[in-house]
Amino acid sequence: MLARLPLYMRLVRLDKPIGSLLLLWPTLNALWIASEGRPSPMLLVIFTVGTILMRSAGCAINDYADRDFDRHVKRTAERPITSGKIKAWEAVALAAALALVAFLLILPLNTLTKELSVFALFVAGTYPFTKRFFTIPQAYLGIAFGFGIPMAFAAVQNHVPALAWIMLAANVFWSVAYDTEYAMVDRDDDIKIGIRTSALTFGRYDVLAVMLCYAATLGVYVGIGIALAFGWLYWLGWLAAAGCAVYHYGLIRNRERVACFAAFKHNNWLGGMLFAGIALHYAFSN
């Protein structure tokens, strides 16, 4: 087992934390807003660790679902399952174990949060299979990646206000933006193997679609800032996030693989800037 540990770590992408961060920023945004800048240490630990565990479980299920496709894509051909270094049942078992630990983490929380976690698990587990029939599976991914938002509000307030669903919608737009950039890297391979992605659906309008999704995401956060009367520190974070989106346009406009992948990874900074604005606003307001 110790000898296979590096393979399991690669399977759940612990060597590539970008995915966990893209889940974590929206969840932290929700925790901070729901608690008015004062989330309890217990909730902070539960949601941070739980986010990492569920992202890891999702990666294992994704590689299980795509094991026959990944061998035809240069970037994924050496993943542990596809290369035969890990058996398919091992990935399923590991995903189930990680999801169980994540559920155990939320046992101290209220019933509503636990009920929402069941739906979150369903969405995360079924996402990999939507690439067979859904033309924009990245939208489904946005729900999976953002369901920590209503769960955070439920954990803090014991109900899910309209604001939580609005923030989830913003996360769907953001996910479509950054995962389309990711899909632009594999466009040629995806055409050959028949997987559906937003990059293929948008076609020659892919760059425009990405920028419109960024605009929708940032537009929602303008509304949030106005509705909650956030101060100048929030708007400074918002401007930095908007600057990231503009920078991404410069990277993806020529549709070069390396540059598109760089844009995808740089979304960590966009999400981080939005969170920094929210956290700084509450820190100085409180």
Image (cartoon, helix red, strand yellow):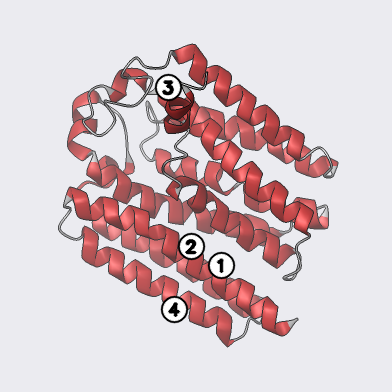
Contact, mark 3 vs mark 2 (Cβ under 8 Å) = no
Task: Determine whether, in the image, residue 261 is placed left or right of residue 99.
Answer: left
Dot 1 or dot 4, earlier in sequence:
4
Q: Which residue is mark 1?
A: 275
Rounded to the nearest angstrom, the CA distance separating label 3 from label 2 is 28 Å
Q: Which residue is mark 4?
A: 239
Say if residue 286 shows up in the picture: yes
Query: Going by the picture, which residue comes out furthest to the bottom?
Result: 232
In this picture, is 165 found above or below 130?
Answer: below
Please name the amino acid that badge 3 sits on: Ala
Rounded to the nearest angstrom, the CA distance separating label 4 from label 3 is 39 Å
Please name the amino acid that badge 2 sits on: Gly
In-front residue for pair 23/172: 23
Please name the amino acid that badge 4 sits on: Leu
Residue 155: percent from left, percent from top: 78, 51
Badge 3 element: helix
Residue 76: percent from left, percent from top: 29, 30
Say if residue 206 shows up in the picture: no
Dot 3 or dot 1, earlier in sequence:
3
Q: Which residue is mark 3?
A: 65
Contact, mark 2 vs mark 4 (Cβ under 8 Å) = no
Dot 2 or dot 4, earlier in sequence:
4
Rounded to the nearest angstrom, the CA distance separating label 3 from label 1 is 33 Å
Q: Which residue is mark 2?
A: 271
State the residue at coordinates (23%, 24%): 193
Question: Dot 4: few (<14), some (14–19), or many (≥20) neighbours within 10 Å?
Answer: some
Please name the amino acid that badge 1 sits on: Phe
State the residue at coordinates (44%, 56%): 174
Residue 285: percent from left, percent from top: 71, 83
In-front residue for pair 199/286: 286
Question: Dot 2: few (<14), some (14–19), or many (≥20) neighbours within 10 Å?
Answer: many
The C terminus, quarter of image:
bottom right
